[in-house]
Image: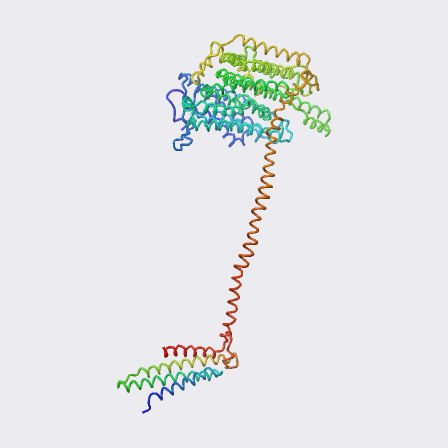
Amino acid sequence: MLFSEATPSGFFFLAPWLVFAPVIGLLINIIFGGRFSEKVIGTVASLASGASFIVSVLLAWSLAAGGGHAVSVPFAEWMHIGSLELDWTFRVDSLSTTMMLVVSGVGTLIHIYAIGYMHEDVRFKNDLGRFRRFFVFLNLFIAAMMILVSGDSYLMLFVGWEGVGLCSFLLIGFWYEMDTLGRPSWANSNAGNKAFITNRVGDFGFLIAGFIMFWAFGSFQFDEVFEAARTVAPGIIVAITLFMLIGVAGKSAQIPLYVWLPDAMAGPTPVSALIHAATMVTAGVYLVTRSAELYMLVPQAQYIVAMTGAVTALFAATIAVGQYDIKKVLAYSTISQLGFMVAAVGMGAFVAGMFHLVTHAFFKALLFLSAGSVILGLERGHHHLAHAQHDDHGKGRKGKKDSHHEDEVFDPGDMRNMGGLRKTMPVTFWLYMIGTLALAGIFPFAGFWSKDEILADALKEGFTGVYWLLSIAAFFTAFYMGRQIWMVFFGEARHEAAAHAEESPRVMTVPLMVLAFLSVVGGALNLPGMHTLTLWLEHTIEVHAGEFVMSVAVISTLLALAAILLSWFIYGRDPLKAGQPDPLKKPLGFLFTGMENKWFVDEGYFAIVIGPFKRISQFLADVIDWRFWHDFVHDTVIAGAYNWFSNIALNRYADQQGIDAFANWLGSATKSLSATMRRVQNGFVRSYALSVLLGVVLIVGYLILK
Amino acid sequence: MIPINYYIILSAVLFTIGTLGVLTRRNALIIFMSVELMLNAANLAFVAFARAREIATGQPLFDGQIFVFFVIAVAAAEVAVGLALIVEIFKSKRSIDVDQMSSMKG
């Protein structure tokens, strides 16, 4: 089946293997993984993901060789009911192959990195079952993401959409019985629930959009929908696109549904990098780009999308400034960068959005994985320290107790515990630097080109407000990344563990180097004047080459440099000492308190949505269901009426005075009748003979006298 | 020649005596004898009617007489069974008073 549909030219028949390669990988790990060592499990999973990448490359190559015309690869009939025909068809076009390459390429690198990372995770404790489960989930994610990007219809896209949501949930709560430091707690599990439930809200929007789409067009298939969309009232398109935006806000962490993404950092760092930075969260951007033809029809919806993205970009960037956890900063940065992408695709700058998606996948994966390397480096230093302490105290119990006590309070992800890591972890430092420069948008790193294209397009399309919001967000981006660099890598170690931090092994740093290389040269994908990506995507969506505007580039670069300089002035010139509060705390006052506490959005949601929701639930459960329905309706009304009916009406009257009385009468009547009759049967033969005689006399008398 | 009515009246008297004997006497043997009396009253009636018809029609037909022989044979068998029963009852009750035999159990 998989091979039989070979087309004469190209490798398009391989498309199903995008999904089936990782599925086979995870099946091997599920079935035989029990006998494998860590290395084998990791290798199988990485090879499966790598196979998916090779298929993506072959597809992209075939597509380019064939002139870039979209190819549909029918794979299976899903359901045919009457005129409703839902098939699983793979769509290979320039947009989907771009996503495939990013997902499987970055995904494979992260698989390799995870082999090293998971081994060293403090929570791992040589539990091979957990190790295997992790890679099974990772492969499942790749498979689901491939279904998402390769689907030929909104329905298959939704299947993948839900699949990646599930994997996200499973992996955020991967250490479900402990918190990020390995202490018993429900924190991770709650974070997983939060992500899942928030995404349900978004998926609800997507579903409604799908329902309207099917109602209006009778199809989910991309081409058919776009064809039909030109002929219907714009109101319907507005409804579809705006409901779709709710889905985008959920999956791509935009206002107002972004709150799950920072908590999602509870998952292992490779998960944060793969799912919550590079690939899954960009699904919303992909969705808008895929629906470009719908959004182009309704400028009002486009404007709302663009503003949502721009406001999110700035809002999240301000929060990132006030965070202390190395991964939380990156999480808010991701939300902010996703805001850039959503703003771009909202403005109709689909190429710029996709361009930023690709480069962001490179440098944000790099930053997250480097942050994981930093955390593990501190972990190693801490471990080293605990051992030294243990040796100092001899073999006495006291020393052991002390080090255990310290285990509980030391947070290796807290930037206030870091400092001076430049010397102890040089490789990670340089990798992190590259990622930071790329994210801050410094020439000539990848982020510079993609971000500038977005800003230039914003001006060209006339979205001035969006341009300013994004520019300020870019300033904040450079500032919080500078702050992070100064706090983590420069100055003096603020904790013993940081002083003893150790560099990560090759299996972790080599994939990082590949990502760093891509972060440096990623801009070449769509250099001004060459427009490789524009020409490539042109085959799928209607786009026009963005122009390179020197003034925009200069302004944004100056802003970024100024921000980095400012961050040096505040954090670099006079490094933070151990226990010292953030130097911004005093001058900014309540503003910094707001940033530190994420502008109290979680608390606000709790007060506005979750609290009332819980109260309503409590009211419904306690008052309506229990007291009214159970106690009153059931116990009093129904049970009472039933009791009365059975006790009084049925028991006393119908049964006792009706049926019972009749039965008793029947009994006593029979009894008295037999009491009379039994006198006849006295046992005396002569009396019987007499009655026979009388009978004979009667009969004969009758016969004679007749 | 004795008219037939005389035989019939004698038969009725004998039957009535037998019936009264069965109804009034308590001794099982007497009851048996009374039953024999009733049977023989019937025999007498059979024979008398048979003779009367022979005279009336002039043809000798022996239906009545043959019935009488049957009745005598049946009566003999009855007596054989009845006397055996009475002997058995006497063995268990030491009495042949029929009023004492009012219960179903032996």
Q: Position of residue A554 (x, y in %)?
A: 55, 8
Is residue B99 something one can see in this rendering? yes
- The colour mode here is rainbow
Is residue A140 something one can see in this rendering? no
Q: Nearer the viewer, residue A451 or B24?
A: B24
Residue at the outermost bottom position: B1
Is the residue A84 above or below the residue A474 in the image? below
| Quadrant of the snapshot with the N terminus of chain A | top left
Q: Position of residue B84 (x, y in %)?
A: 45, 80
Q: Nearer the viewer, residue A621 or A173?
A: A621
Q: Position of residue A686 (x, y in %)?
A: 47, 79
Task: Please count the marks in the image.
Answer: 0
**Residue at horizontal 56 percent and vertical 9 percent from the top:** A555
Q: Position of residue A696 (x, y in %)?
A: 41, 78
Is the residue A691 above or below the residue A335 in the image? below
Is the residue A512 above or below the residue A661 in the image? above
In the image: residue A167, left or right of residue B18: right
Q: Nearer the viewer, residue A429 or A245?
A: A245
Is the residue B46 above or below the residue A666 in the image? below
| Quadrant of the snapshot with the C terminus of chain A | bottom left
